[in-house]
Amino acid sequence: MNTFENEQGWQLDSLRIDLVKWGEFAGKHTAKITFQNKNTDAFTFVLSPEETMAYIHLLKDKIASNAGFLGQRLIQSLGLLPAPEETKAIGEAITHEAV
């Protein structure tokens, strides 16, 4: 197994995904990734919209799950409707009355 020698202490400092509002990539997402070492040297690179979408694809299930949870909390906080008893996953059968 190969190991990565990191004598200078390089580590991921930030990963930021933004929706571009103008220019060549307007309406698309791009990402900026920054690495920094213990000597405060740093480098940054930008991912194309296609590369960024690969990261968003990895996160889509987590994003959807958290959005559903947020929706339940908002409904509960408004006191307008009771929150659903349980959420169903995509593709999970939902029982119903016979017609």
Image (cartoon, rainbow, N blue to C red):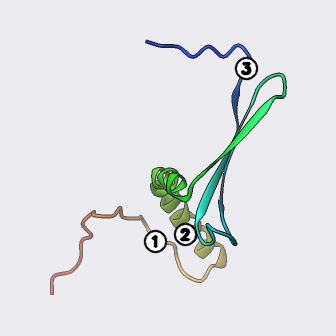
Which residue occupies the extreme bottom position in the image? 99
From the viewer's perspective, is residue 16 above or below residue 34? Answer: below
Cβ–Cβ below 8 Å for labels 1 and 2?
A: yes
| Label 3 to label 1: alpha-carbon separation | 48 Å
Under mark 3, the amino acid is: Gly
Image quadrant containing the N terminus: top left
Q: In the figure, is residue 75 to the left or right of 64? A: right
From the viewer's perspective, is residue 71 above or below residue 48? Answer: below
Checking the image for residue 84, the label placed there is 1
| Label 1 to label 2: alpha-carbon separation | 7 Å
Specify which label sits upstream in the sequence, 3 or 1.
Answer: 3
Under mark 2, the amino acid is: Gln
Q: Position of residue 23 (x, y in %)?
A: 68, 70
| Residue marked by disc 2 | 72
Quarter residue 97 falls in = bottom left
Q: In the figure, is residue 31 to the left or right of 81? A: right
Q: In the figure, is residue 57 to the left or right of 97? A: right
Which residue occupies the extreme right position in the image? 40
From the viewer's perspective, is residue 41 above or below residue 48? Answer: above
